[in-house]
Amino acid sequence: MYSILARHILYPIAEKFTGTKLMKYLNEFEDTQWWSPQQLRELQNEKLRALIIHAYENVPYYRRIFDERGLSDRDIQTVEDLKKLPILTKDDIRQNAKDMLAKDFQQWKPIYGTTGGSTGTPLECYTTMDGASVRWAVAFRGWGWAGYKIGDKRAHIGGTSIGATTQLDLKKRVRFLIERVMPISTYILDEERIALYIRKLTNYKPKFIYGYASAIYMLAEYLTKYKIINITPIAIFTTAETLLPYYRMSIEKAFHCKVFDCYGCGDGGAQAYECPTHNGYHLAIERAIIEFIDTNNNIIKPGQTGDIISTDLHNYAMPFIRYNTGDMGALAETHCSCGRGLTLMKSIEGRILDFILLPNGNKIRGLRLIDLFYEHIGGGYIKELSTIKQFQLIQNKQDELIVRIVQGAAPTDDEIDYLKSELVKALMYPMDIKFEFVDMIEQTKNAKRKFIISNL
């Protein structure tokens, strides 16, 4: 009953004051998800042409890019034409920040923001009120595939997105009130704080839980350890970090429900969600055009892993056209059996920085090494190391890898030698592997936990 009230009365009233169009887009996207791939591609082309005309006429940076290549706005008519334009990097944005703002910048109700700054330097950028409406409409649609309805009680486990270190602004407080959201900060997650959050979740009884994958995993481990079985949401939505296979298994076992993983790039407009088939991630292609490219900036085939390139079709204040998100993934080679026409992404391979650079110049996918910890440690060969709570791989030199481990019982020399040999096998190249046993793994400024840190 409350979800009907929230969607049809409370939210429409609130949007009259905020100027957002979330409900309009949600209704639209719930329809377009069932369009054919061809219909959706035509919708993308229509939105792309409008964006290109705007960028060409109003954004100094893009006018210069077009002129340097002898192009006009008429040369970009379809998604296939985008390859005529260069890839936009974070450095390009930093070096041309003022020229990337549209001349009619204020007209689009710009919203200032920053990225997480995985490289150590956060990226300052602007989205728009329209873009924010689209983003939340896409999220509500994606969560809806798991049964979520606006107004269903939800626990939100995150960092800066919930104002963990500052007071929530008025708009966010009102939105959380309407949506019945209970915010939980991940900035401190020791056992005492986790116990407090478990009590809050027990009392609040959320229908859904949304938040950082590693934080929800830690809550799940606590539930399992103390045999707590009274927190049973309908579904859990993980985001912001790589959802490791054993994270999913542990969370689903502890909370007695399915996990639906989500992907989002706030600055680039890319969003993707799992549907109940769990065969991949449906890209929100009504919001952004997504390309997958190799190291030579060539479009790659489905099934191949490459850089995720996003063109936000709704950011007119500071357009991001062919923006390198810093993430890597692969398109699926088939369509999803659910019947949605949305493009299916097979996998999210992690951040570009989540790769280990070998002395011979090759790169090893970080998830491959993480899988090794799960298979060989969680699998039980190294009995003492099976008590590992957290781990992190750090690369400061091309021939050296530091393995930081938070664990219980101290491993023997034989166990350490075995783990070293398994890491060398996975790397397929000899490296100097050093172990550090620590009390905790530090979080990023956004309270996330990174498994791979490459400082090269």
Image (spheres, helix red, strand yellow):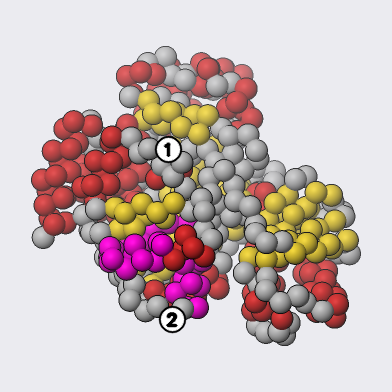
Please provide percent x and percent y for residue 123.
56, 32
Residue positioned 50% across, 42% down in the render: 310
Residue placed farthest to the front in the image? 192
Can residue 10 be spotted in the picture? Answer: yes
Identify residue for label 2: 227
Q: Residues within 10 Å of mark 1 (few under 14, many from 20)?
A: few
Would you identify the image quadrant in which residue 77 lies?
top left
Q: Amino acid at mark 1?
A: Thr
Please provide percent x and percent y for residue 452.
68, 56
Asked whether disc 1 touches disc 2, contact meaning CB atoms under 8 Å apart, the reply is: no
Q: From the viewer's perspective, is 55 left or right of 412?
A: left
Q: Which residues are magenta?
A: 196-225
Q: Nearer the viewer, residue 286 or 456?
A: 456
Q: From the viewer's perspective, is 334 left or right of 452?
A: left
Determine the secondary structure under disc 2: loop
Determine the secondary structure under disc 1: loop
Characterize the magenta stretch by its predominant secondary structure.
helix
Residue positioned 38% across, 37% down in the render: 167
Q: Nearer the viewer, residue 289 or 190?
A: 190
Marks 1 and 2, the one that precedes in the sequence: 1
Residue 154 vertical placement versus 259 (above, below): above
Residue 166 vertical placement versus 383 (above, below): above
Q: Residues within 10 Å of mark 2 (few under 14, many from 20)?
A: few
Identify residue for label 1: 166
